[in-house]
Image (spheres, rainbow, N blue to C red):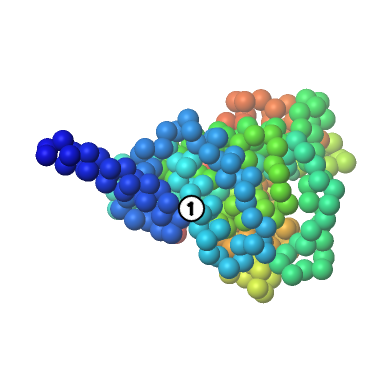
Amino acid sequence: MALAALVLLLAAAVTGFLVVKQGLGSGAGSGEQAVRETVPADDSAAMQSEVFQSVPLPGESASGSGVVGAIGPVAAVRITPRPPIPAAAASTTGQRLAGRIICIDPGHAINTNSGTEPIGPGSSETKTTEPGGTSGVVSGVPEYVVTLAIAKQLKVLLEAEGAQVVMVREGDSFEGLARDRTLIANQAGADLYVRIHCDGSTNQSANGVSTLYPASIPGWTDDIVVESTRAAKSIQAALVNGLGVPDLGAVERSDMLGFNWSDVPAILAEVGFMTNPDEDRRLASPDYQLRVAQALDAGIADYFSAS
Ligand SMILES: [Zn+2]
């Protein structure tokens, strides 16, 4: 009898586990934490690439039902190595980003896409999906490599402070439209969507950092402008302070697909010019990439601390 009861209990536990996993997309149940703890960190990259390859097109996710729920929040959970700490506990643990969901988007990818797509929902104005980024004038390193290196360093820093980090890509390639990147941030319900890019110019002496934020466009970005602007100013100040390079300002933009499709506060950091020989050499070095990540981390934390 005792053995039968034990078997029954075990079966119930396993079933419960599966049910909790299935139900993750729909909200934060008490079981969510238990599942988070059972997801091994090493598994997360593989899980994540699966998730990202199945990101739906905007038309498919417009209802906000099943598909969105099944992908977004699960992605957020999968790549989180520890459960979030309640906000009330944050000050005593030093986890200043506890409970925050941050989506990091390393700009560009190894694969380009010369197709075009609308610059915002329902727009007849279009932009090239993935024209490819700039590259180092001295180092020859492509922008997508530098942005990913910085993004990975930033992920570690943010997670150490209790944030849940959702990466748009963790490998060199990104399959999908440009707006699919933004949909990952939307579906994750990110508190902040951080896009990382490097600048380029035909003028090799141009150098310094800028942080872009969305202009207010009714129906597209009017609901995220206030927070995006505040985040951009915090991050720009931290970049200038942390890197000691020229301050090219926080800059409003109305033409950016990655802003116009965003439902969450969004910024784009241009962390230096790869067309400037000095800045290119620095950006290609892991030490400087870490400094950029630390500056971004400081700016993000400043933004949330004032929330
Ligand atoms: Zn770029």
Task: Evaluate whether residue 20 shows in this view.
Answer: yes
Q: Is residue 85 left or right of residue 171?
A: left
Closest to the observer: 227 or 53? 53
- Looking at the image, which residue sits at the far bottom? 218
- Residue in front for this viewpoint, 252 or 52: 52
Q: Position of residue 226 (x, y in %)?
A: 57, 65
Q: Residue at position x 71%, y 67% from top?
A: 121
Q: Is residue 162 above or below residue 140?
A: below
Q: Quadrant of the C terminus?
A: bottom left
Above or below: residue 171 compared with residue 36: above
Taking the image as shown, residue 72 lies to the left or right of residue 288, namely left
Quadrant for residue 133, please give it. Answer: top right
Q: Residue at x 72, y 64 (%)?
A: 120
If the image is split into quadrants, where does the N terminus sit? top left
- Label 1, on which residue? 73
Q: Quadrant of ligand 1?
A: top right
The outermost residue toward the left is 1
Is 291 displayed left or right of 139 in the figure?
Answer: left
The residue positioned farthest toward the right in the image shown: 202
Q: Residues within 10 Å of mark 1 (few under 14, many from 20)?
A: many
Residue shown at 41% from the left, 37% from the top: 39
The residue depicted at 62 percent of the width and 66 percent of the height is 62
Q: Position of residue 207 (x, y in %)?
A: 75, 39
Residue toward you, 183 or 5:
5
Q: Secondary structure at mark 1?
A: helix
As shown in the figure, which amino acid type bears the numbered disc 1? Answer: Pro
Vertical comparison of 273 with 15: above or below: above
**Percent coordinates x, y for residue 125 in the rendering:** 82, 65
Relative image position of residue 248 (x, y in whole percent): 71, 49
Res. 246 in view: no
